[in-house]
Amino acid sequence: MNATIPFIPEEAPFTTEQRAWLNGMLAGLFSTAPAIEANSQPAGKRIAILYASQSGTAEGLARKLAKELKALGHLPAVATLVGYTSAALAAESHALILSSTYGDGDAPDGVGPFYEQLCLEHFPRMEKLHYAVFALGDRHYEHFCKFGADLDAKLASLGANQLCGRVDSDVDVDEPFARWKEMVFARLSKPSSAASGSVSAIRVEDSAADSVKSKIENPAGNAISRDNPLLAPLIGKKPLTLSASTKLTLHLTFSTIGTGLLYQAGDACGVIPRNDPNLVAEILQNLRFNGNEQVACGPTGATTLHDALLHHFQVTRLSRKIVQEYAERGRCTRLRELLAPENKSSLEKYIHGRGLVDLLLEFPGVIDDPAELVRILPRLVPRLYSISSSPAAHAGEIHATVAVVRYTSHNRERGGVCSTLFADRASVSDRLPIYIQPNKKFRLPSNPDTPIVMIGPGTGIAPFRAFLHERRALGQKGKNWLFFGERCAASDFLYRDELEPMVRDGHLTRLETAFSRDQAEKVYVQHRMTQHSRLFWEWLQEGAHVYVCGDAAQMGRDVHATIHEIVTKEGAVSADRAQEYVAALKEQHRYHRDLY
């Protein structure tokens, strides 16, 4: 007999999202029933047969399927997805889902709430679930079987295991349904099916896995590090900015379930990037190499030139050393002139916004030896992103908040190596090599009642999202004050759907925003700090910890100067005494900066 799974009732004082999250958590905790004596265990499997039906076809097939499974000795239970909860599905070990598509690719009437629960950001993972989807539709409509396909993809992204591939059926269902049943019955008849995992291949773009797979596909027993990263599945990717924005910022979710990878709020996620394959192809074309040439590649040994340029060497930026090596080898007069000490500013201007391909185009014929090329190139280094999730609130996941870098320079469209990888070349289900970079100087106060002030414009908000979720998950009662800035409130208010409810329920004590382009004069976070200087000083006097995350070149300096100004003004002290006060904050580990 299955254990009864408790649930949060509708009248409980929670939002819909909170109630769904809690129900999922309870389902996960109580889904493992007490062990049954071996001699009393039925031979068949308990199987949930779920249908989403508009005209009754899916329901009829579901009931027919249940009879056949019962005849085979299984324990089927038929239910409609109308009113069914995602938490209940998470508690099942096997589920067969027959889903129709209605209207413009929508779910049948009444099924929408079930799917919306599945799509909640914090919905629990479903590694225990083994499922198969039979999708019904009509090929005369543009979005043929779309809801079934969406449901299948969503379950896969949550870690559920496919018993067999989805079958899409037109209005003539007999042959597709028979074919799907045959595959399902074959899988259910295998004793190992409950642990067989997904039958869908996980696509790894290009040959990224080839260069790291031997190290990390299953790192059990090995310490995960920069040299031994984890190939983590990308299970979520969504834009945080709206289409009207002048920039694109992404929220990424990696699964770490079963890997033993641990982190703390405030740590960074290191990502081993790879260059754009199209850029690598252009470089090889200009060099007249085929890419199969063998080259030395440091500790990794020999590899092909193509692999070296794709995974191991920096090709998108120039340095003085690269220009110097190239100039000497090619006897390039113009480059030699730029390298003269008196032309330092001209060299910096030339280097800015150029990469290897620009040298090859402007000064062709210099490199004729692949080994010489890799000798002058610097190594491709990992990119670090402040983790925007909390291990207490997002078990088995790592979240990152990434601004996609794109720009035009010297008549060429360019972009950040790693951010454009996320945006353009990595899809959900791809595995990317990651590791944890601890940041021991950027931790929450040990006293849970200590107030904190967080200053993080743009993607600098990432660790503060983690902090807020961490403090809530752990029940910490300290006051929380966030300063956040971006360009426009309408299109660039990152995590607005999370922050504003936190303000309403009191978890986020204060939220100050600075949207620089929403008025004639630019307004930044330091201006908001100045406007609230008296309260800022009062929080400092209460023992608040101050955290700053974001751009070091401008924002970090401006915020640092503003803190000094607040101390000088509100503390009624000299500039020297204010400097001593801020230095003391650092010594007391109350002033933390994570700048990049």
Image (spheres, helix red, strand yellow):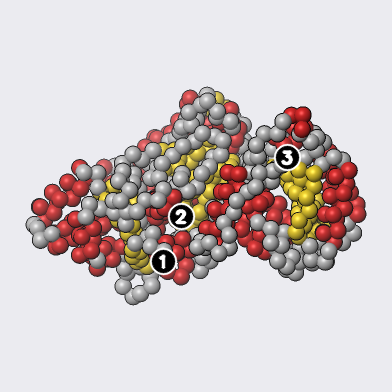
Picture coordinates of residue 253 (x, y %)?
Answer: 53, 48
The alpha-carbon separation of the residues under discs 3 and 1 comes to 45 Å
Q: Which mark is residue 199?
A: 3
Picture coordinates of residue 173 (x, y %)?
Answer: 88, 57
Looking at the image, do the residues carrying marks 2 and 3 touch, with CB atoms under 8 Å apart?
A: no
Q: Which mark is residue 504?
A: 1
Rendered residue at 20%/65% (across/down): 534
Amino acid bearing label 1: Arg
Q: Quadrant of residue 197?
A: top right
Q: Please state if 259 lies on the left or on the right of 575 as rendered.
A: right
* Mark 3 vs 1, N-terminal side: 3
User: Nearer the viewer's eye, disc 2 or disc 1?
Assistant: 1
Where 135 falls versus 522 (above or below)?
above
Task: Decide if residue 50 is in sight here.
Answer: yes
Rendered residue at 20%/60% (across/down): 538
Quadrant in which the N terminus appears: top right
Amino acid bearing label 3: Val
Q: Which residue is mark 2?
A: 403
Q: Please state if 38 lies on the left or on the right of 323 as rendered.
A: right
Label 2: which secondary element = strand
Looking at the image, do the residues carrying marks 3 and 1 touch, with CB atoms under 8 Å apart?
A: no
The alpha-carbon separation of the residues under discs 2 and 3 comes to 34 Å
Picture coordinates of residue 335 (x, y %)?
Answer: 38, 43
Q: Please state if 446 lies on the left or on the right of 52 as rendered.
A: left
Picture coordinates of residue 321 (x, y %)?
Answer: 37, 37
Where 423 falls versus 108 (above or below)?
above
Amino acid bearing label 2: Ala
* Mark 2 vs 3, N-terminal side: 3
In front of the other: 131 or 329: 131
